[in-house]
Each structure stands twice: as structure tokens, then as C-alpha cells.
Amino acid sequence: MPRNEASRATTATTPAAAARSTPPLRSARGQHGPVAPPARPARAPGQRASALALSLAGTGIACALLLWTGWLARDEYWIVARSGVGYALGIAGLAMMALLLLYSLRKRIRALRNLGSLRGWFLVHMMLGLLGPTAILLHANFQLGSRNSTVALVSMLLVAGSGIAGRFIYTRIHHEYHGRRATLAEIRAAAQDGRGALGALAQHSPELIRTLRELESRLLTPSSGRVQGAWRFLRAGGIERAAVRRAWRSVRPLLTAQRRGADRLGLHPRAARRALEQYGAAVRRVARFSGYERAFAIWHVLHLPLCVLLFATAAVHVLAVHVY
């Protein structure tokens, strides 16, 4: 067949062949309606916690830089509380402190429970807790004025300090930042897992068993009074570190006397030391858990009167500024 006829024949048969070989394109609508877009993969809890930590760290750094700049320029009087930027900072700071109450309303009012995640509300709550005091300190230009403004400023600082302390305690008894309680049973289970990893060592070292039992007895036995409990809470870290050092000295000869000892026990010296430290830290967390819970309950009792004092003194201050 001549070349030009072969070309015409190929050209003539190509569309039909393509139609038979190519699968039909699916319509944008399925059999029962529009095709839903693929779901976005959910973030892992660790990624969410990291994003929260980065957001808070960024807000804290920004507030620290603003406060440092304002402190260095406080004698220049670029910010005056009665007018201009200083007046606006006072209004903004008071508004942000008032918005902090929305987090409590979100937790307690049933109609608001579907309005966003509690974790997001808590993040906004903590950010406002940093931005509000920063704006008010810049508004005051780091100076004490009249008696009512001084009381309002001190009340604000007390509430801010109380909030920072509450967040520290909160993270010790909650997972991530969203209110899922870490029960004592969960932390104790982690401690038991740490001890299980030391099973091979415990079989060859009775002294290690005695040391671990002594650590549990000193930290986990219920205290006879509040003073003893507080003293144990403060000394838990030192007791745990001393017990881990004694435990390491008791098992180190088993791992270093001969090189094949680690192979026989199934543990590398570094892995054994890490397991001891993890177990000691888990026992310390169990011992301190009740103390943190008690401290958080006391914090709740004290934080509410401080908030009431803050808003009462702020109202008196605003009234005094605009009326007198």
C-alpha cells in the first residue's frame, strides 16, 4: 500500500479505535448526586499540640517584645493613657480581659457547646490572657497613677499571674490542651509499663527490686497529713533521682562486667538506663498527680475572687476617669 493511502487509512480508523480503547469519562455527578470531594486527613494529636504550642509561643514572644520596647521608651511618653494610642490600648486591653469570660461560658452553657471546639476556645483564652495585660501595661506606661488605677493595675497583674499558674497546673493533669483528664490509673499504667521493660534486670538483681519497691513505698504510700503530703510533693524529684542512681549502680555490673552480659539479658546498658529513668519519672508523676489536682482545686477557689476584684476595680477606674 502506498504511504499516502496508509496514512489516510490510519487517520480514518484512529478516532474509532480511540473511542473503543479509551474509557468513558465519569460525570461530575455520581449515580445518586454530586461526587463529594475527598476528605482532608485529620491531624494527629501530637501535631495539634505542636500547633497550639507554636501559636502560644509566637504570641508570648510578640508580647515580650512589645513590653520590652515599651519599657525602654517609658520615659519618652510616646503613650499617654488619657488620649490617642494609650487610650485605645486601655480600651482594647479591658475588652480582651472581658472576653476571657467567654471561655467559661462556653464550658458551662449547653447552647454554646457546639460552637467551635473547646481546644480552640482554650487557645483563644490563653492568647487573650497574654495580649490583654500587655495592652494594659502599655496603656499605663509601666507607671502607677491614682489610687483606683493602681488597684486596677495590681488586680490585673494578679489575675494574669494566677492564669499563668493555672495553666501550668492544668497541663500537669490534662492531656494536650482540651480538657481530657489524665487519670491516676493512666499514669500508673505507664509506670507499670516502664517496670515491665526492666523485667530481665529484676530477675538478676534483687537489689534493684528492693530499690524500686522502696521508691514506690516512699512516694506512693498515702501521707498522714497535709504537711507531710506537701513535703513529699516538693521532695519527689530528689527522691526519684536518688533511687534511679541507686538502681543504676545495682544493675551496672551486670551489663558491664562482660560484653556478652548485655546480650544474655537482652538489654543494652543505654536502654537499661533509659528504662530506669522512665520508670522513676512515671512514679514521680503518680506521686505528684494528687498534689496537682488539689492545687488546681485551690486555684479555682482563688481565681474567681481575683477576677471579680479585677472587673470591679476596672469599672471604678473607668468611671473615675470619665466622670471626674
Image (cartoon, helix red, strand yellow):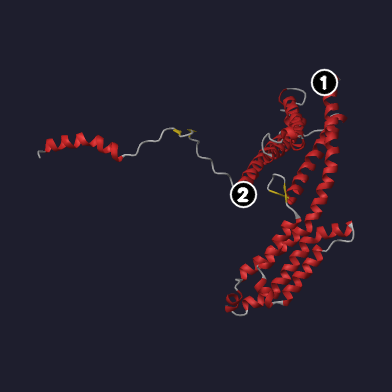
Where residue 12 appears, as percent x and y from the top left, is 20, 34
Residue under label 1: 322
Secondary structure beneath label 1: helix
Residue under label 2: 46
Amino acid type of the residue that numbered disc 2 sits on in the rendered structure: Gly
Extreme residue in the left direction: 2
Which residue is nearer to you in this view: 231 or 67?
Answer: 231
Indicate left or right for 66 with 314 as reference: left
Indicate left or right for 276 with 2 as reference: right
Q: Quadrant of residue 23?
A: top left
- Up-down: is 47 above or below 101? below
Which residue is nearer to you in this view: 123 or 200?
Answer: 200
Mark 2 touches mark 1? (CB < 8 Å)? no
- Up-down: is 92 above or below 209? above
Q: Residue at x 73, y 37 (%)?
A: 129
Secondary structure beneath label 2: helix
Q: Which residue is drawn at 74% across and 76% down?
A: 207
The 10 Å Cα crowd at callout 2, few under 14, some 14 to 19, many 20 or more, is few
Name the quarter where the C terminus is drawn. Answer: top right
Q: Residue at x 63, y 76 (%)?
A: 255
Total number of numbered labels?
2
Where residue 122 appears, as percent x and y from the top left, is 70, 40
Q: Quadrant of residue 54?
A: top right
Single out the mark in the foreground, 2 or 1.
2
Task: Give the CA distance from mark 2 to mark 1.
Answer: 49 Å
Extreme residue in the bottom direction: 258
Where residue 190 appears, as percent x and y from the top left, is 69, 60
